[in-house]
Image (cartoon, grey):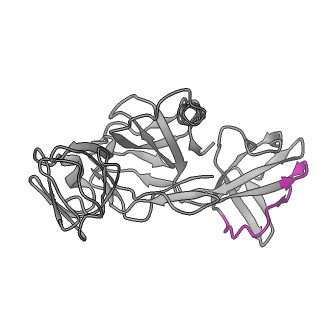
Amino acid sequence: MTGLTNYTSDNLLNYLTGQIPEASLPSVYMALFTAVGTDAGTGFTEVSGGGYARVQVAGALTLGGAFTTASTTLTLASTAPAWLLALGTNGSGATVYDVTAGGAVGTVSSVSGTTVTLTSTASRNSSGSSDSLTFSAFPNATGTAPSSLTNNSAVSFGTTSASWGTVLAWGFYDASSSGNLLTWDFLGGYNWLPFEVASGSNPTFSVKANGYSSNDPIVFTAEYGGTLPSASTGTFTGYTVNYVATPATDAINVDTTSGPTTPVVLTSSGSGQVRKILQQGILSSGIAVSFAASTIVVSGA
């Protein structure tokens, strides 16, 4: 299911029940997928070739001088790495957290050499001149049911040198290659909505207040409850992409293709959740691939 993977959920629950110490996660890398898999972190097809590489969106650096609540700049122990400069414009929008002192410091305005300029004075004092700091494209989570966070910094994957295929999802890993998948989601940031449907040829799916349009790509799941319908035409397992047909306020029909349509034929009734997604074709060289600020939403109930 979209959200935390088994790896992350297991570690979080083990930490909350006192079985393991709180994990240290100094580096986080964003990946793009053309096909998605399971909560076990398997079955995902990551973009490859064409100049693609995962993008680091968070990491740890060492302070090179003390700061106070009167400070508008921080001094790093060494020149800022390329991944930090690539966030936003010269690190703009990144959140700084002092791991050693234990607390948020502020938001980055820009980074040059070893100097980090903040948008305002630091919100706390450092505990010394060599504190460990973390920088992230994301601010602290806020809100309830669910809590969420949205990127403050633009995240750029650079320019393609060949086709990347059709991207439909993203994920966070703890390594620049291989590693553990931490969380993932479809592009688009749309909500899951409950559905019910009876068996039959081209049946009507009940999806209240869906707001869908014809040919919107959609995926189905029963992980939150329900039983997906069986189909002789069409597939509903494994997040197979289907398409909206004849949408109404509280109902839709479903086709297996967009444009020239092939309506689904169901051999059993079903229920569960349906979600609109975004499919982004990145099909040639010379395309600049980036996510603007406030377009990557990570949530947790």
Residue 72: x, y in percent? 18, 67
Q: Position of residue 94 (x, y in %)?
A: 30, 58
Give the extent of the magenta segment.
196-214
Q: Is residue 94 above or below residue 64?
A: below
130 is within the stretch colored magenta: no
Secondary structure mainly formed by the magenta segment: loop
User: Along the line of sight, which residue is nearer the eye, 177 or 167?
Assistant: 177
Q: Is residue 203 above or below residue 237?
A: below
Q: Quadrant of residue 192?
A: bottom right
- Measured as percent of width and height from the top left, residue 100 is found at 29, 44
Q: Is residue 214 visible?
A: yes
Q: What residue lies at 79% left-to-right and 44% top-to-bottom?
A: 225
Where residue 44 sits in the image (x, y, percent)?
A: 51, 34
In this rendering, the count of numbered labels is 0
In this rendering, does residue 288 appear at all?
no
* Above or below, 203 relative to 240: below
Q: Residue at x 23, y 58 (%)?
A: 91
- Relative placement, left or right, of 36 versus 265 is left
